[in-house]
Image (cartoon, rainbow, N blue to C red):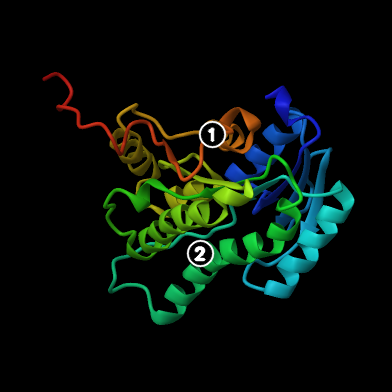
Amino acid sequence: MSELTGLRALVTGGAAGIGLATAQLLATSGAQVAVLDLAPDDLPAGLRAYQADVTDDISVRSATDAAADALGGIDILVNNAGIGAIGSVEDNDDAQWHRVLDVNVLGMVRATRAALPHLRRSERAAIVNIGSIAATAGLPQRALYSASKGAVLSLTLAMAADYVREGIRVNCVNPGTADTPWVGRLLDQADDPAAERAALNTRQPMGRLVTADEVAAAIVYLASPAAASVTGTALAVDGGMQGLRLRPAGQ
């Protein structure tokens, strides 16, 4: 990861959870890092903070240009900003569908459009989109969220095809259920948080939730020159949830 020295990275939704873990790992690996977030407060030393709302194109363009000016350019864009949703297709109204798709899909579109002029000036340009196991596996009570992350997966492939000849690599990381503040809040709302956590642990073949640091490591690999021949790829960091079909324990 020493190859990141001298590179400039922009992380959306980088003030907490997977985004913050990624921003910190990029920085400790040698990159200069700017964070775009609705509330980029109290960031660790070494991370540049820029307030932006990914549903507002002007806000995103202004913050991206300011970050690029401060960093001297952008080599890496991590499209991490996103929100969750719970329910079947019957449970979320049109306004919530519009809101989640606006953040999770169009937010990536806006950030990418804003960063592309800067990425085109880089010799080691990379974009990493944050997807989800929900894009490739049917999960209960995640209809809206799954639809948004399925769109992210397809968007990643289309972007990779569009920009490969310009030297801009585009990949995505599909985490399993990660131990993040958002998941923690969901667990706190459950009737039996301990039982719900145990159920989530059991759902992943490795028997535990994915950590934010593990997801960050995958993101940083795909963003780094070490992955120079990797584009149009979805890297699962899900404890085997998507690919493994295990017998019940003891059989």
Residue that appears at 54% across and 68% down: 106
User: What amino acid is at disc 1?
Assistant: Ser
Quadrant location, the N terminus:
top right
**In the rendered image, is residue 126 in sight?**
yes
Going from N to C along the chain, the mark reached first, 2 or 1, is 2
- Describe residue 96's horizontal placement relative to residue 163 as left or right: left
Residue at 15% of width from left, 27% of height from top?
Answer: 248
The numbered disc on residue 22 is none
Tell me: residue 192, above or below residue 3. Answer: below
Closest to the observer: 205 or 132?
132
Which is closer to the viewer, label 2 or label 1? Answer: 1
Residue under circle 2?
Answer: 105
Identify residue type, mark 2: Val
| Mark 2 nearby-residue class (10 Å; few <14, some 14–19, many ≥20) | many
Which numbered dot is residue 229? 1
Residue 122 placed where, x, y %? 74, 46
Depth check: give the residue in front, 68 or 184: 68
Secondary-structure class at tag 1:
loop
Distance between the alpha carbons at the discs numbered 2 and 1 = 25 Å
Q: Position of residue 238 (x, y in %)?
A: 39, 36
Give the answer, above or below, for where 110 lies relative to 248: below
Residue drawn at x 34%, y 26% is 206
Residue 191 appears in the figure: no
Q: Which residue lies furthest to the bottom in this view?
A: 94
> Dot 1, how many residues are within 10 Å of its Cα: few (below 14), some (14-19), or many (20+)?
few
Q: In this view, does 67 lie to the left or right of 56?
A: right
Give the SS element for disc 2.
helix
Q: Position of 207 compared to 215: left or right? A: left
Whole-percent x, y for residue 80 in the image: 58, 51
Marks counted in the figure total 2
Instruction: Residue at 81% x, 49% y: name it.
Output: 73
